[in-house]
Image: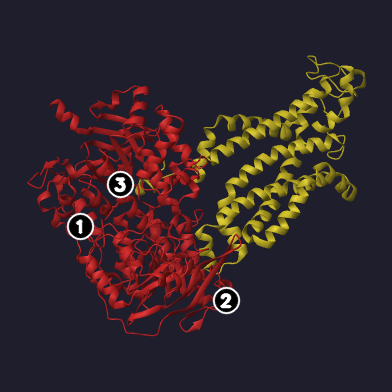
Amino acid sequence: MTKSAKAEIALELHDLSVAYRVAGRNRAVLRNLSLNIRQGEAYGLVGESGCGKSTVALTVVRYLPRNGSISGGAISLDGQDVMKLDAEALRRARAESVSMVYQDPGKALNPSIRIGRQLTEIFELGGITGQAATDRAIAMLNRVRISDPPSVMQRYPHQLSGGMQQRVAIAMALANDPSMLILDEPTTGLDATVEAEVLDLIAQLRQELSASILFISHNLAVVSNMCDRVGVLYAGMLVEEGPTDVVFNDPRHPYTVALLRCLPRGGQRKDQGRLDTIPGFLPGIGADIKGCAFADRCALADNRCRSELPPLYDLSDERGKRLSRCFHHDKAQALPRATPSDVATAPKPTTAPVLRVAGLNKTYASHGHALRAVKDVSLDLRPGETLGLVGESGSGKTTFARLLLGLVPPDDGGTIELEGKALAPKLENRGDDQVKAMQIVFQNPDSALNRSHSIRHILGRALKRLAGLSGKVLETRLDDLVRSVRLTDRHLAVKPRQLSGGLKQRVAIARAFAGDPRIVVCDEPTSALDVSVQAAILNLLADLQSKEDVSYIFISHDLGVVRYLSDKIAVLYLGRIMEIGPSEEVFSGPHHPYTEALLSAVPKLDQTETARIRLDGEIPSATNPPPGCVFNTRCPRKIGPICEQQEPQLAEAQPGHSIRCHIPYPELARLQKAAVTEPA
Amino acid sequence: MSAVPTTSSPQDNMRRRSPMAEVFFSLMRSRTFLVGLAIVLFWVACALFGEHFTPYDPLADDIINALAPPSSEHWFGTDQIGRDVFSRVIVGSRDILTVAPLATLLATVAGTALGLLTGYFRGIVDDVVSRILEAFMAIPVVIVALLAIVALGTSKATVIVVIGLSFAPIIARTVRSAVLAERELDYVAAAQLRHESALHTMFVEILPNVIPPILVETTVRLGYAIFAVATLSFMGFGIQPPSPDWGLSISSNYGMIGGGFWWTVLFDALAIASLVIGVNLVADGVHGALND
């Protein structure tokens, strides 16, 4: 390799192997990983959790935890062999040429030091002090599009929102003008609208900076929008690599094919077929892998796959250089489905609503101010129907769910009717039948399942209390219940911590279904799960619904997921319903400007880039909502003073589809149609 | 580094040791814990079987040999009525090792119940009970003991009740803060959505999850309880003569120090100190193992 060609490569990993020492044994995490990132290139690394993505990030700067060690291979950064650097040189490399941004900005920033000080510190390390350092810090904050940097510098991290914190973290990472920027899940945990902002920022910065980017994410859509090339990691091995759009549109490894199939795409809905899943589990770290690591989960695998490690086949063509580690790369896309797609859907007879909510309000007292978490919400839900609740965090989705369940009593005046009978506001005043009719699947199974109890105890107790069973009958029903969520007897004896996230969530679902509920609230049930597991959980929820005729109230920030499962959507903003209607109408529009912005914020795999709408600023405080239409401060389609003076009514635009906006429906339709045809 | 898998994937998890087993192995690796345990077990053995291997009867006086300095005959010397100090120190752990653990047990049971109650119900229950407990904590143990003795008379039972009730509020406070954190978890909401009674939720759902802090607090309190029993005995409110109890012995002999008869007091004092240190080492070990 000539000298100039070498200089073009910003990061090169050659045959890298990393092991973690767990319980006295070295377990391989990365296996002979080779990849290189050119200068100015954005390289995406994708794969399920536990496949070694973060380890790659840590290894590049030799920042592995104490039990981790590099067991072979070479890392070269700007032509420098990182393995050969002494402590001082390594420190300089970390300070000057590589920067990292982690998933949780709250943890990356020191909570007890003001933002300004944390930023100037970096410049002081580089020998710039005093006013000069302050000026540089302000310039950095300007660069990451933070308005009013001097005031932000005076604040502590907790006084900033998640999106702002992540901007500050990015500003810190860019402070020393690194040649390599490592972003480890930088937008996971942020709201869709904030995620879109941060991604936009990174995309803009790419134009300005020469830095190469290693972008680690489990979100395929984010990677497809941000990166030039992508590498798919499985069990610490690179299984496929190539230009992003080529890999995602024409995958040549069964794992990539399967991952892509797990996502509800192109507006797929539950009645159009089940999502595909990936059977089995990722091999544990350090597992002895003979042959192809994915063979156990791959329907295309034959004997050769199980005994012989496939090489990285070079499949380069005119679309670019690409690799696939599969003997059957030519027929990878013919991978048979792991889950049959077909669903039997009987047309639902229109019956009386199972749930009817009218004029529901919830006001909290917050430091002497009234905080209206939920304001005047009315809706109804039919048996077997799913209502999707969407909106940014702080929009009142979870509070609304808790009001329904009676975990939080609503303000006086509103009514909740279950099958025609009014429900007491407080849970303890509701009848046993009413309580068991409405159950919930919480977001985080670690919090929702008692870690001291066995699965048998958890489900047995639910059956006893909710279904009133005992003895033999309970045992029989427990078996049925366990089987209905596709767990086995083997899982009954263990405690929740011994199960994976997906299995825990199945237990939580089984618990909610113990007493044959009429309504199950699902509060972000898949947000902590990998896509393959998410697909299985969504399928399970859809199957249970068609079998039991149960209604769901489904809360999620992932609009693709909401669309897959919902018949009806309510869009919440500052505790108010901004739009409610049949799922397809809300998604296809014309819709409320806020819905429009939410939809446009979602990174899409199918790269049909439409005019992107960005919301400025933060969601306003619910203690002091803006006058008039609460959305007016951020609305890209604001029409004038009327928006600031008068709160619009939730008016029916089409039968069953209501929008809270001053812009008349035909006008919204015209505006939004124009936006789609306009070039971005 | 939250993102680093130090543990392993789902199917490996199935084979992982239970939390209790993990704590046990961690304790067995902790030198602090093992040294503390050895000291404590030594004194427990002395309390149980000491009388069989003491060279002299710890209660037998021998006026002719009174205040004899340590020698090969009397390793720790003799006290003012000629009783063998070594024999008395060996058996002297018996009363303190009955009273202190029982007092700690009482404190733990009462404190846990109060902590669950205040942490679970919060609001007005918490405000009222917590203020009463704080008022209680403000009164020194000795004053409570004085009052109790006037009311109940001196006996081991009085000492147990006094120390138990004095320590209960401290344990209650620790339990309360642990319960407050647990209460926010969704499994408590899930229990409410099964219409479980408050008692069930507190004792069956929450209690098992707050055992670790209770265990740590209990071992720490045991060290303090030993000290408190010795103090009360020294002041004459605790264990009564003719028991060879350490605190009592120091109390009846400390006037002798001025005359140079240091051995009548020093060995009892060292015994108390070693037991308290032993218990505290155990407490440190338990704390470390549970917070790994």
Residue at image mark 2: A412
Judged from this view, the residue extending furthest toward the left is A318
Amino acid, disc 1: Gln
Q: Looking at the picture, do discs 3 and 2 lie on one chain?
A: yes
- Give the x, y percent position of residue A638: 36, 67
- Give the x, y percent position of residue B73: 80, 16
Describe residue A401's horizontal placement relative to residue A143 as left or right: right
The residue drawn where x is 28% and y is 47% is A204
Judged from this view, the residue extending furthest toward the top is B72
- Kindly state the secondary structure of the residue where label 2 is placed: loop
Q: Are marks 2 and 1 in contact (CB under 8 Å)?
A: no
Which chain identifier belongs to the yellow chain?
B
Q: Which of A465 and B47 is in front in this view?
A: A465
Which chain identifier belongs to the red chain?
A
The residue drawn where x is 65% and y is 34% is B280
- Kindly state the secondary structure of the residue where label 3 is placed: helix
- Give the x, y percent position of residue A420: 47, 84
- Find residue A202 and name its label: 3
**Of circles 3 and 1, which is in front?**
3
Q: Can residue A470 be seen in this view?
A: no
- Find residue B80 and name its label: none
The residue drawn where x is 14% and y is 30% is A5
Amino acid, disc 3: Ile
